[in-house]
Image: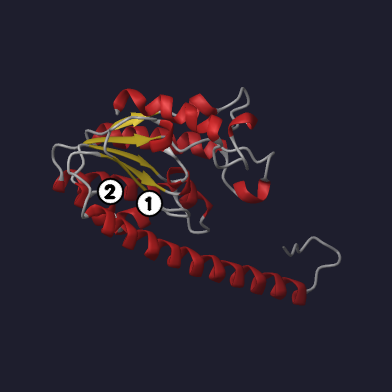
Amino acid sequence: MCNKDDTNFTHDDCHYDKLVEKKMNELFSFFFDSNTKMRIEWFESLNKSTPSGGIVLVGDSITQEFCIHEMLFNNRLPISNRGIGGDTAKGILNRIGCSIIELNPSIVFLLIGTNDMADINYTMKSLVDTIEEIVRKSFEKLPNVTFYILSVLPVNSGIDSATVGKRTNEEIKILNDEINNLAKRNNAHYIDIFTLLKDNDGNLRNELTRDGLHLNPQGYRIFLDAIAPYL
């Protein structure tokens, strides 16, 4: 990207960089919107044959990539995965009907927030408010549901700084405190996975991730062990 302190900087360079960034954002939005539409259509179809009273996991790519059914070998728990790669809290709020309400679950696990933090318009207050609205709307329609909010996971920029982007563990820890507080305010439950995945420096442990942001199978084993007592 252009840097005004660079002696080789020109306005043409900066204009070109901004155009590239804009085109990349437009391309990402196109593929994300297409994928989201396809996933929602798939969810709506699956919901027609999904029994009520089950368990639903809702979130972004970290949830989508969680192969919980295979990891719970021979387990007959009715679990629905409603993760969409690249999704945000606002995205889940918009699809709360097909991803939570229509399933009429007894238990919900929500993991969201890391993509919100990467957005240029991100504010912690807006994210926390949106998560709180997801919880409140869920309870309005499902007063007997047990709702778990999982902590946002740590990151490790030393593995892939481009993927991690502007996310920092310091900011994530503050966000998780806010999520814990909103859970308490709304009769929901908070599960701290951040602490289980971090190293001594507060980063996502190298052996648990493929890119500093997403988990690998070893990371998902810790994830599963953390939520298993609540299934």
User: Would you say 54 lies left or right of 163 here?
Assistant: left
Q: Residue furthest bottom?
A: 12
The residue that mark 2 highlights is 134
Which badge, 1 or 2, is on the more N-terminal residue? Answer: 1
Question: Of the residues shown, which amino acid type is indicated by label 2?
Answer: Ile
List x then y, in percent, for residue 201: 63, 26
Write the residue at 86% across / 67% down: 8
User: Would you say 139 lies left or right of 204 here?
Assistant: left
Q: How is the image coloured?
A: secondary structure
List x then y, in percent, for residue 124: 43, 47
Quick check: 172 above or below 82?
A: above
Write the residue at 39% across / 64% down: 38
Q: Are marks 1 and 2 in contact (CB under 8 Å)?
A: yes
Check the picture and name the quadrant holding the C terminus. Answer: top left
Quick check: 17 above or below 77?
A: below
User: Would you say 228 lies left or right of 160 here?
Assistant: left
Q: Residues within 10 Å of mark 2 (few under 14, many from 20)?
A: many
Return the residue nearer the eye: 124 or 73: 73
List x then y, in percent, for residue 176: 43, 35
| Quarter-of-image position of residue 199 | top right
Spatial separation of the CA atoms under disc 1 and disc 2:
8 Å
User: Would you say 69 lies left or right of 114 here?
Assistant: left
Q: Residue furthest front?
A: 74
The residue that mark 1 highlights is 89
**Count of numbered circles on the image:** 2
Which structural element holds mark 1? helix
Which numbered dot is residue 197?
Answer: none
List x then y, in percent, for residue 192: 42, 28
Question: Of the residues shown, which amino acid type is indicated by label 1?
Answer: Ala
Check the picture and name the quadrant holding the N terminus. Answer: bottom right
Return the residue nearer the eye: 159 or 1: 159
Write the residue at 36% across / 26% down: 228
